[in-house]
Amino acid sequence: MKIFAIHGSPRDKGNTEILLDAFLEGVAEGGGEFEKIKLYELKFSPCIACGECDHLGECVLKDDMTLLYEKYLTSDLLVVATPIFFYSHPAMVQAFFERFQAFWAKKYKLNHSHPYGKNPKGILLSLGATKGKKLFEALVRTFKYVMDAGWGTYSGGLFFRGIDKRGEILDYPEYLEKAKTLGKEIFSLPEDKWSLVRDLSP
């Protein structure tokens, strides 16, 4: 299984990246192959709603997202690690999600199947400062549709509330252990046995 991991926080080496790295440590111990991309190091635009992908089946914008398209298409699992900003995800994560419009058009407008015959799985790793019950609902709802657009399915995620200060997640080693365990389970257990939250949002 090939894993494509997205670090979606604008902060380097913060709580989100620490959580993602714990997950990837488990992946490595399980013998998995992965690639980690930091969105803030790339330059790409959000969708400009030009509609060209409705006819072409691909995005006409030529930027770093072109590379991410291919990485996603050749992967079996997309992991998006992101903090919560104002009960949703950061702008750079939203821009990444919006550019899946090209996949949606290719799938639903042009009736094309996945170029490599894959059915990618999607996992979220997320944390936020507040403890509201609906803290992660917008992220989950959006990601479900993103995965569907990309010929994939949402598997679930790990979500942690009350994490705010830089490095604060280190005060909760049990959270990092959960992420590491999930990384291992992907290679040793069937999907329905993975230790993650599946039904957070409609």
Image: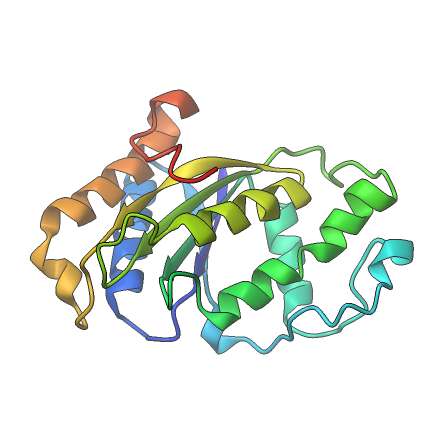
- Comparing 11 with 160, the one in front is 160
Q: Is residue 176 shown above or below 48?
A: above
**Residue 62 falls in which quadrant of the image?**
bottom right
| Residue 17 relative to residue 171: left or right | right
Q: Is residue 70 shown above or below 168?
A: above
**Residue at screen point 85% across, 38% down:** 111
Q: Is residue 63 visible?
A: yes
**Residue 192 locus on image (x, y percent):** 40, 22
Q: Is residue 79 shown above or below 44?
A: above
- Comparing 110 with 19, the one in front is 110
**Residue 160 locus on image (x, y percent):** 24, 51
Q: Is residue 36 shown above or below 202?
A: below
**Residue 37 locus on image (x, y percent):** 47, 63
> Residue most toward the right?
55
**Residue at screen point 41% across, 37% down:** 156
**Residue 188 falls in which quadrant of the image?**
top left
**Residue 22 locus on image (x, y percent):** 25, 51
Q: Is residue 190 visible?
A: no
**Residue at screen point 31% across, 44% down:** 158
**Residue 84 falls in which quadrant of the image?**
bottom left
